[in-house]
Image: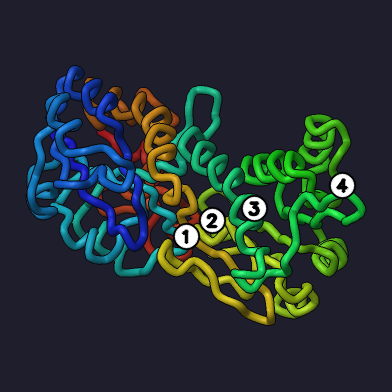
Amino acid sequence: MNIGIPKEDPRRDRRIALTPAAVHTLISAGANVFIEKDAGEGAHFTNQKFEEVGAKIAYTQDEVYKRADIVLKVSPPSETDVDKLLDSQILISAMHLAVAKPKVVEFLSTKKVCAVAIELLEDEKGDMPVLSAMSEIAGLMCIQVASRYLENTNNGRGILLGGLTGVAPASVVILGAGTVGRAAARVALGVGAQVVVLDKDLNRLRSLEQQFNYRITTGLVNEYNIRKAIEYADVLIGAVLIKGEKAPRLVTENMVKLMKPGSVIIDVSIDQGGCIETSRPTTLDNPVYIQHNVIHYCVPNMAANVARSAAFALTNSLLPFLVELVENGLEKTIKEKIGFAKGIVMYDGFCTQESIAKRFGIEYKNINTLIK
């Protein structure tokens, strides 16, 4: 089985899905691995390092696509990316089809691509290892991003997150107590900020309070609580996720207008459309904009800012699925690994995720009915 890894557009992403060590493991399992020249550059993996473990360097992206049975990406495919795919090829990548352009879904369907969304893959416990790893990175990064943009040089409020003797710390409000929220809360508490976490799940909030020895303030997500919390917020972090679906809009534009001038919004949910009405996707090169005197940071792939760490995290999460695929083939892996099957969003021209099919008005079929 041939695995092809194209270079990501550096304006959108700097990650690579596999480290040289992982490439060596897959080659030992019987795969051939073709990597586009300088695909590992953003994560500081040289072409030489990949060649030393047996990978073949391809000098054009077209060559990678033409040689591959499996195309392995990190960022969601663009229209240009899916146009390069061959009929019945396997694409393994972040997909986020809930917010994809219709043309992307159309190409995946007409070319009968088997599209595997890495953010939906599940392990034997039912956890989502890739999503959890990238979410943890995003949560940890939120606080260092917030600290940077609160500085005067970035038009921020000019305050320290942790305060100092005789000076109150910043207020950090987090919407969502999942992986992103937990990681962000941990770092925010570590630097001395006041932390408020809102979620719809009382058990999750209770668990978070116990984890942090009751040093955070918690509340249920509703319009009143959100409005009151963000009026006093110096930092607002949107960390809401509904698996495979568009994020709900919890914060309205009128609520954003109530925030302090120079405060910071970090909408981690932007991958799935964002949970804040004033959010719109930004890029690694131009990550922020100011609206209603509030700084908005809405980079869909925050983990790309720490591409090397992210590459190791991706490898740890993805490698078991890839080894299984190389050793047993696609159909057997789908039949025997429920967690892998749950990651498939398109197969043989059909959408295998009901909510996505409904959104685009296309035919839905359960993946198990499509496998011979």
Foreground: 215 or 61?
Answer: 215
Amino acid type for the residue under numbered disc 3: Ala
The residue sitting at 65% across, 56% down in the picture is 147
* Disc 2 to disc 4, C-alpha distance: 28 Å
* Disc 2 to disc 3, C-alpha distance: 14 Å
Q: Is residue 261 left or right of residue 114?
A: right
**Which numbered disc, 2 or 4, marks the residue that appears first in the sequence?**
4
Q: Is residue 337 left or right of residue 221?
A: left
Q: Which residue is mark 4?
A: 217
- Badge number at residue 239: 3
Quadrant where the C terminus sits is top left
Q: Which residue is mark 2?
A: 245
Closest to the camera, between mark 4 and mark 1, is 4
Quadrant where the N terminus sits is top left
What SS does tag 2 mark? loop
Q: Percent position (x, y) of residue 207?
A: 79, 33
User: Residue 69: in sight, yes or no?
Assistant: no
Foreground: 360 or 77?
Answer: 77
Q: Percent position (x, y) of residue 13?
A: 36, 55
Q: Percent position (x, y) of residue 189?
A: 76, 42
